[in-house]
Amino acid sequence: METVSDEHSAKLRKFSPAARIVVVLLLASAALLLQETVMAQTSVAAPKPAEPLTSAQLNDSMRKLEAELLAKYGQAQKPRLSTGLHQGMEFWRPEDGDAAVFESFVRINFAGDQASLDTMFLRFQRLLEQLDGHMHEISREFATQQDLDLGPIRSYDEVFGGYDPSAHVTDDFFQNKLAFIVLLNFPLTTLEERINDGPKWTRRQWAETRLAERFSKRIPADVNLAIAQAGGDAGNYIARYNVWMYHLVDDKGQRLFPPRMRLLSHWNLRDEIKADYGDAQNGLLKQRVIQQVMERIVTQSIPQVVIDNPQVDWNPFTNQVKPAAAQDSDATAKSDAKITNAPEPDLRYATLLKTYHASRMADPYSPTAPTLIDRRFNEDREIPEERLKAMLEQVLTSPLVPQVAKAIESRLGRPLEPFDVWYAGFRPGSKYSEAELDAAVAKKYPTPEAYQKDIPNLLVKLGFAPERARYVADHIIVDPARGSGHAMGAEMRSEKSHLRTRVETTGMNYKGFNIAVHEMGHNVEQTFSLNDVDYTLLQGVPNTAFTEALAFVFQAQDLALLGLAAPDAKSDAMKTLNDFWGTYEIAGVALVDMAVWHWMYDHPDATPAQLRDATLQIAKDTWNHYYAPVFGKKDVVLLAIYSHMIDSFLYLPDYPIGHLIAFQIEEQMKKSGSIGPEFERMAKMGRVTPDLWMENATGKPVSADALLAATSEALKQVSQP
Ligand SMILES: [Zn+2]
């Protein structure tokens, strides 16, 4: 099983259900219509301009309304009414109207009996699905040129790609008071309540909870736009960060990598390290070169001119650059590029800082989660930061780490080097060379269409009944990706999910296939959790770690899908050790991401250079604490190489949690004997809390225990002759 190697994360972030809690969507035309209706209702009572409403006035209104409405609807409505009035008041601003407007609004819009409430609930559910679905459709279309392999990206494509059509929706919904109608009738909850009381709620209560959450913030449109823009800019910075490998030279001008090999940082660089374990002749040398390149990127000592430029040769050890002595690209020279080794001017950290500054703009409008860190953990993930950190530390400090490290050293026949955090030799598939795998995949999938056509067969191999396989396949569209690949789900039932995969002119290669299978896992989850969930308000999974976990389940089957591996006890054990090592690696990466965000919040005026130094220190400290004792080398900065750190707003902790969750889910699937039906049963649960979802799926809450217990067993299995 691979550590996730896709770039879909930004898309998942942008369109995850959790993100939609913040960014509430509305079609502009619908907004106008609805606004007119509300205005017509309220204009009788309040034709005059709004005056600021004092809390005394509001309290007075509250008492009056409570008495009046309880007389009308009965005392049983008291808790609902009280909650609704408080929620309405909390978000009411002077521009929303005076006390008379507030009172009139409540009288008209409080649903005091079950039938009115049911009608309201169903109407909001149906229309919000349409809203989300169409907004998402626009976003996807606008980003098409950026996301797909369709030729040059023009200046306006970047503007389209950075545009968020839903940015004004929150404002609109508060302005036309649809948000207030929800807040008046459906309760907001805390994470604590969802964790403690959620297991006793009905499905409808869960759906109502998610409906109310959409309006737990009143973030202005310009703030949402600024965040989307910073995310888009960072994504572009990352998407162009290619290294031309043929142009990496040693002191003798020797080239270790083949012509035309262009690797995107960090995904392709890291995956090349993994692949190089299969190269007995030059693998180790190549891995050391890539580690050096990664360190140059992290420390920003990489010469600016070598980034995505096949016109220069670069020795990453001496940092010398020269005009390319050999051509492997038709790309014309960048005319203005002077060939010097002047370093990239901390752009990596300037880009990260911009995402932080944009995120901070939302803080004042998010009183219950006043930092991006809070929003990520308490709202998006719904796992408290401390609990998540404890699970990561449980893995990082496990006595199993030195044991597995020893097993790796004995397999390699040498002491570990830092890049061995990406050791991939536990994979049963490592017996095939990259070239063999590439050839097999290219033959099978010369084009994206060929992959599209094969999806039903692949799903049947994964245990889906032919009818279900056909049903799911009919909901997936394959597109040629510009980057390494990503999955983009739909947001309404009349739309399909998109699988973006990179297919070279010579056909799909193994890396591309491995990623495509992972993304297909996302697409299948997206299909079930949208189309087969009982309430569309519960569409999705608890957080992105769960969709990653389900995608891992697919990805782990990639060789089997190629007809190359027969799983047995030993290869299962190998896979477990691979999972464990991958979790150990990405747990440290996640801790670095978390610490860097805390550092930015503690140093709001930091310069890019200061952030660079802080990040390097955090990466070294994390390495020294959890890795140096195992690797015998201190002050390594590799944990800071992940591109997600720059463009994905504290996304990385989802990966290690994803591994833990994936492991729990895979164990469950083994127990049941087939992936397909279990996958469908789990994915239909929808977006409840992580622990509740996992209880339904496996009978236990989220935990690292399953992985650690199985790793212990796997070590015994592998050490047997
Ligand atoms: Zn993924």
Image (cartoon, rainbow, N blue to C red):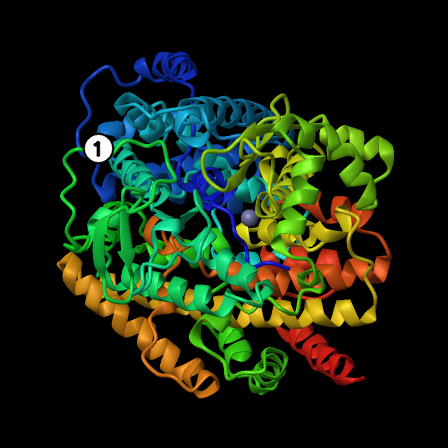
In this rendered view, identify the residue nearer to me: 566 or 115: 566
Give the residue displayed 79% in from the left and 46% down from the top: 462
Q: Which residue is mark 1?
A: 94
Looking at the rendering, which quadrant does residue 167 occupy? top left
Looking at the rendering, which quadrant does residue 365 occupy? top left
Q: Report the side of 254 relative to 82 (left or right).
A: left
Judging from the image, what secondary structure is the residue with disc 1 in?
Answer: helix
Please determine whether, in this image, residue 143 is positioned above or below residue 718: above
Give the residue displayed 60% in from the left and 79% down from the top: 408
Q: Quarter holding the N terminus?
A: bottom right
Where's residue 378, x and y in %?
Answer: 44, 57
- Mark 1 nearby-residue class (10 Å; few <14, some 14–19, many ≥20): few
Amino acid tagged 1: Pro
Q: How many numbered badges does the structure rendering display?
A: 1
Where's residue 123, x and y in %?
Answer: 57, 23
Q: Quarter holding the C terminus?
A: bottom right
Give the residue displayed 37% in from the left and 41% down from the top: 239
Where's residue 671, x and y in %?
Answer: 84, 62
